[in-house]
């Protein structure tokens, strides 16, 4: 699987930002999550982030918490996540796993990196490890040619922004707000300056996440970032259609289309 | 706090918060790193500032009532054949060792110029202590508490509210202590510019394990000196219960370099470790990362945190402070499970022999320490000395005691069934 940077290069060639969509594996079921993510790819997502459901998701708001909990209660396992990666990566879009650290440590970081690469995964986004406490992951990712997507936040010092950007591969995830995941009405005025600070420290793509839920917000973010990350809005769409897969998938496609138009409208 | 506070501890963390290179550290979202760095610098500056240290000592003395007494429990000593000394943290203001930690952290919050504090709580003891410190220092206070626990501990919810704190029930996850910590972290990510997180135990990301230890270590510093002054000897063993590990590390720290002193931690064995319904994290958990630190964690094959069980809400936590994991790995301290039934037996025993009703958390230490005392008494004779950290009083636990022992019905036919001394029963 090529690095996520290929998706950013393609979007850039088209004069637009990339659309990155997130869903947890195993939500609403393992098969259901594969169907949903494939629909997101077909409707215009350039990159897929697959969440690994975890019992203690400190960076997630109520929407993603609820989905992860549902997936865990239905019995999703780490190996199921790899199965979802394989199925989604087969569509050809770069596919990353977004996970808290302990499940990876438990699986064995070296074995995890090998299995993720073998499944066609492009790499991993790590919300609760930073490069300065993530040397085991950095080594395993490098050994298996995987993307390492670390986060920066509005509170990050310039020094840490530079350190994080140089340790990342694929892209840098800029958290638009000081807060947990979840849709927000107003867009953040912290994201633009943060993106500029990342740009000042290298030319790795920067994608902005947290709070984006519709095409207009996506267009706004796309006007200054290389990528727009949407999570809770996709999860909410599925939560709003319990037990009705057809309706859920249709709504997911409609949202993806709106967002994909947004990243094109916001062209720089 | 005495001069010893300033000395480097051999068993201490490195400057990145790792104990023995493996345990502890800081596995946290980048959004909180700036705040944790700021806190680390503020704490280190404060501990090196004689004015801060003496103000902390003054507040603890005048307001919280420290130094707590080291009391010779003579009847208990006679029963076990060794000298049993109780470090009376139960007599501190708010009834537990926890006041030391919150007064230290709240004083630091003031020094950092922040106006609001948040805290998590299980049984409500740390929440009550935090609300107390917030009242004393005029800080806004929000306490996160698992919804299951707010129902179990309504009296402590009322206490916190009376003290002026806002109590937020947490419905997510298992709706208990670990989820309250998650929710407090989520609050903190969004409020970090004006809010300090008063973490309730010696766990979590760097600098909390070391900082909470520093604020609690007066327990051991005092006890060591009191033991020398009162009896002219160091103890043969020291003992404490271990939830997250604040009262235990608070006692142990002063004795770590006294290699001749045995160090014993007692973990909540619940229904028995073999049943799987327990919270004996070091004894039965495996290394992993929870709430920002690498430590022993109760987890399943996939690294998902497993729910813990203990009759004592204050010990009902699936993680443990990383310094304890390090001390266990080194063999410097020994951690042994004590079941619910054993702890309740010790609660009754201490009540009846000494007229002291301990918290159920504390009763775990009492049970385990009496076993140690019996052994040491046999080995060394009746002058063998054991210090037990009497971390808290049992008033909050009367509901549980009523159910467990069948108390409270003065007209009832049935006599409450209470054991005599552990080991004396048929
Ligand atoms: C009296 C008492 N002892 C012990 C504990 C356990 O905490 P720690 O292990 O941090 O001392 C608690 C927690 O609520 C407590 O109230």
Image (tube, helix red, strand yellow):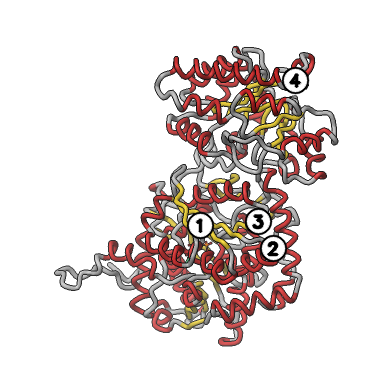
Give coordinates of residue B190: x percent, y percent: 62, 47
Name the front one of labels 4 and 3. Answer: 4
* C-alpha span from label 1 to label 3: 16 Å
- From the top left corner, tell me how far across and down residue B362 is, in percent: 45, 67
Mark 2 crowdedness (10 Å alpha carbons): few <14, some 14-19, many ≥20 = few
* Residue matched to label 4: A267
Using the image, determine if residue B53 lies above or below residue B211.
below
Quarter of the image where the C terminus of chain B is located: bottom left
Check disc 2 and report its element: helix, strand or loop: loop
Q: Quadrant of residue A8?
A: top right
User: Does label 2 or label 3 sit earlier along the sequence?
Assistant: 2
Q: Residues within 10 Å of mark 4 (few under 14, many from 20)?
A: some
**Is residue A115 among what the camera can see?**
no
Between tags 4 and 1, which lies in front?
Answer: 4
Q: Which residue is mark 2?
A: B113
Residue topped by disc 3: B194
* Ligand 1 within 8 Å of the CB at mark 3: no
* Tag 4 subunit: A
């Amino acid at each position: 699987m090529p690095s996520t940077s290929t998706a950013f290069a393609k979007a850039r060639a088209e004069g637009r930002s990339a659309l990155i969509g997130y869903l947890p594996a195993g939500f609403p079921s393992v098969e259901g999550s594969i169907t949903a993510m494939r629909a997101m790819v077909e409707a215009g997502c350039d990159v897929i982030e697959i969440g690994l459901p975890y019992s203690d998701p400190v960076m997630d708001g109520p929407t993603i918490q609820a989905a992860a909990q549902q997936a865990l209660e239905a019995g999703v396992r780490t190996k199921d996540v790899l199965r979802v990666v394989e199925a989604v990566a087969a569509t050809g879009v770069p596919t990353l796993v977004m996970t808290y650290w302990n499940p990876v440590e438990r699986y064995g970081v070296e074995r995890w990196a090998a299995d993720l690469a073998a499944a066609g995964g492009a790499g991993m986004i790590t919300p609760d490890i930073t490069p300065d406490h993530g040397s085991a992951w950095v080594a395993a990712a490098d050994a298996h040619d995987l993307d390492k997507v670390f986060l920066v936040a509005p509170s990050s010092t310039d020094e840490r922004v530079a350190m994080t950007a140089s340790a990342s591969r694929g892209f840098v995830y800029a958290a638009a707000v000081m807060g947990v995941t979840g849709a927000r009405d107003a867009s953040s005025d912290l994201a633009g300056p943060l993106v500029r600070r990342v740009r000042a420290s290298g030319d790795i793509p920067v994608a902005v996440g947290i709070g984006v839920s519709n095409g207009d917000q996506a267009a706004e973010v796309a006007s200054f970032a290389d990528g727009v990350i949407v999570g809770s809005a996709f999860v909410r769409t599925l939560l709003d259609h319990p037990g009705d897969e057809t309706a859920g998938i249709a709504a997911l496609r409609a949202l993806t289309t709106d967002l994909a138009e947004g990243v094109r409208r916001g062209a720089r | 706090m005495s001069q010893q506070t300033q000395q480097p501890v051999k068993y201490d963390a490195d400057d990145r918060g790792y104990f023995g290179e493996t345990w502890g550290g800081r596995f946290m979202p980048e959004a909180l790193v700036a705040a944790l760095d700021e806190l680390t610098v503020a704490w280190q500056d404060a501990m090196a500032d004689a004015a801060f240290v003496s103000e902390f000592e003054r507040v603890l003395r005048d307001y919280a009532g420290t130094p707590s007494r080291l009391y010779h429990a003579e009847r208990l000593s006679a029963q076990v054949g060794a000298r049993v000394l109780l470090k009376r943290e139960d007599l501190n203001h708010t009834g537990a060792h926890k006041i030391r930690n919150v007064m230290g952290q709240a004083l630091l919050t003031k020094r950092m110029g922040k106006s609001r504090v948040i805290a998590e709580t299980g049984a409500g003891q740390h929440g009550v202590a935090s609300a107390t410190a917030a009242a004393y220092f005029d800080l806004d206070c929000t306490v996160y508490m698992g919804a299951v626990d707010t129902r179990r501990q309504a009296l402590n919810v009322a206490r916190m509210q009376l003290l002026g704190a806002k109590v937020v029930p947490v419905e997510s996850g298992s709706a208990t202590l670990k989820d309250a910590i998650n929710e407090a972290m989520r609050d903190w990510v969004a409020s970090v510019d004006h809010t300090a997180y008063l973490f309730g135990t010696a766990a979590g990301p760097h600098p909390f394990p070391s900082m909470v230890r520093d604020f609690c270590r007066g327990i051991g510093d005092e006890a060591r000196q009191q033991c020398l002054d009162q009896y002219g000897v160091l103890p043969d063993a020291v003992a404490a219960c271990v939830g997250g590990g604040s009262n235990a590390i608070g006692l142990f720290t002063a004795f770590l370099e006294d290699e001749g002193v045995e160090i014993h931690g007692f973990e909540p064995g619940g229904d028995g470790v073999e049943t799987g319904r327990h919270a004996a994290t070091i004894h039965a958990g495996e290394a992993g990362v929870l709430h920002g630190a690498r430590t022993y964690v109760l987890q399943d094959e996939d690294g998902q945190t497993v729910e813990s069980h203990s009759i004592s809400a204050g010990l009902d936590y699936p993680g443990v402070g990383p310094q304890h994991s390090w001390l266990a790995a080194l063999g410097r301290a020994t951690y042994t499970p004590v079941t619910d039934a054993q702890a309740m037996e010790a609660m009754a025993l201490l009540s009846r022999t000494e007229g002291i009703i301990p918290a159920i958390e504390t009763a775990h230490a009492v049970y385990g320490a009496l076993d140690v005392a019996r052994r040491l008494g046999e080995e060394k004779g009746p002058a063998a000395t054991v210090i037990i950290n009497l971390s808290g009083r049992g008033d909050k636990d009367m509901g549980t005691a009523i159910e467990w022992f069948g108390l409270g019905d003065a007209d009832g036919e049935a006599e409450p069934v209470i054991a005599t001394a552990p080991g004396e029963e048929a």
